[in-house]
Every structure is written in structure tokens, then in C-alpha cells.
Amino acid sequence: MNYQIADLIVSYEPKHADFARFLEPFIYEGDREPDLVLTYTEDDIEAMHKRMVEGTTVSEAESFGVANLFNKRIIRYGAMLVHSSALVLDGKAYLFSAASGVGKSTHTRLWLREYGDRVHIMNDDKPVVRMYGDGVTAYGTPFDGGSGIALNENYPLGAIIFVERGEHNAVRIPSDKEVIQLLYFQTAHMVGAKTAEAMLQNFDSLIRRTRFYVLTCNMEPEAARVMFRAIKENER
């Protein structure tokens, strides 16, 4: 079966029904040849399932494993998965990324309450960013991380925001060095030397094409308003 993910044609045969359901909106029936042929066996899924936390389904293990494989293969196309919640505001995608447990999804849901029809979540775990010329496009993927939110959409990337927990709400601009460190832990970092070099080149290209912020916040609605104001002020 062929799928179109981040404008790449991906050949893969899903093994479990729940993951196949998330792939359905991405089915490709055109004439393009596959850019990527992914192979992930039942043995691979079983091995991944054993390494994951108790309560994870085999379908979630398949999704996680295929996402990792996909992420490593798309590096040469100037693309990467970013562990984040992709929120769409006024026609642009904003990726909120954080270490597990910090509350990136909780934060983006504050935006749904604050800004209503102006916003929606495109993917709540593993959207893709892909660079074209001077711009960057953010794509939804079928890799939902168990959230159930995995839309087949794409928008220009507005910014990537790294979320940290704090008592008070504040926004700052990180250095390029800090951005590379933060991105590294939210993308594929278990890669060989040659792939790692290409990945770092992608980081450099992304830094030159988009805005980055660090948001220190609590989980009150004001946190969304503080970040919204910072975005709009810097887009003027």
C-alpha cells in the first residue's frame, strides 16, 4: 500500500488494524513511484512492544517503530519528525515541543479554549517539518502517539516553541546552540555518523528559516496568551 506523508510517497503494509486506520487518510493512489519503501515485521513490532511501557498496544508499538524508521529515512529529503504538538493558528503551524511529562498537549489545549475556531491541532505527537527553498512546511502524519489526533494537513511553519514548566509565564529567544541541543532530543538521535551529519545540516537549515522560542509556563490560560502575544509581536 502507498501513502503520501510529508509529500513523500511511502510504501508500507500495516500489520495491525488500529495503525492501518490512522494511515487511511494518507492513502496515495496516484502514479508517483515510492520515495521510501519501509519494512517493519511482526518480530520488529513484538520487540518494540516489549520495550514500551505497560499498557501500550501492539498497534501503538507498530506506529512508534514505523515512525522511528520513517524519521531516519526522511533526513535526506530535508525533513524531520519533531516530537511536538502541532497547533494551527490563523493558517500557520506552531510546534510545541517538550520533554515527556512537561505538558505540551495540556498547553496546546489551552489555546483551543482561548482562541476557539482560530486554532486546531493537526498532530499531537509527531508532525514533520520539511524545508523547501527559503521556507518550511509542517505536515501532519499518521503517527499519533496514542492521542488520536493525526490529520493529513500541511501549513507553513510559523515557529517551534520549546515548553518548560515554571511558576510564571515568560518567553525568550534561545541561542542557536541551545536550539540544536533541544531539537536533537526531540528528533531521531539514534543514527549512524553519515546520517547524523545530514541531520545536523537539516538543523542548521531549519534554524536559518524559522523562529524558535522557549516558553516557561504554568498551565493557566495566561500561558497561552503570553505566547500568543510574543508570536504576534515578532511577526510584525
Image: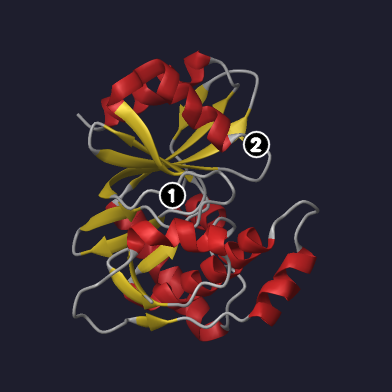
Say what secondary structure mark 1 lies in. loop
Quadrant where the N terminus sits is bottom left
| Residue 129 visible in the current orientation | no
Few, some or many residues within 10 Å of mark 1 (<14, 14–19, 20+): many
Vertical position of residue 21 compared to residue 164: above or below? below
Q: Position of residue 59 (x, y in %)?
A: 62, 62
Q: Position of residue 56 (x, y in %)?
A: 72, 55
Vertical position of residue 125 compared to residue 12: above or below? above
Q: Amino acid at mark 2?
A: Val
**Of the numbered discs in the image, which one, if any, rests on residue 150?**
1
**Of the numbered discs in the image, which one, if any, rests on residue 232?**
none
**Of the numbered discs in the image, which one, if any, rests on residue 102?**
2
Earlier residue among tags 1 and 2: 2
Vertical position of residue 24 compared to residue 197: above or below? above
Q: Position of residue 30 (x, y in %)?
A: 20, 74
Vertical position of residue 82 compared to residue 175: above or below? below
| Residue 64 visible in the current orientation | yes
Gap between marks 1 and 2 measured at Cα: 21 Å
Quadrant where the C terminus sits is top left
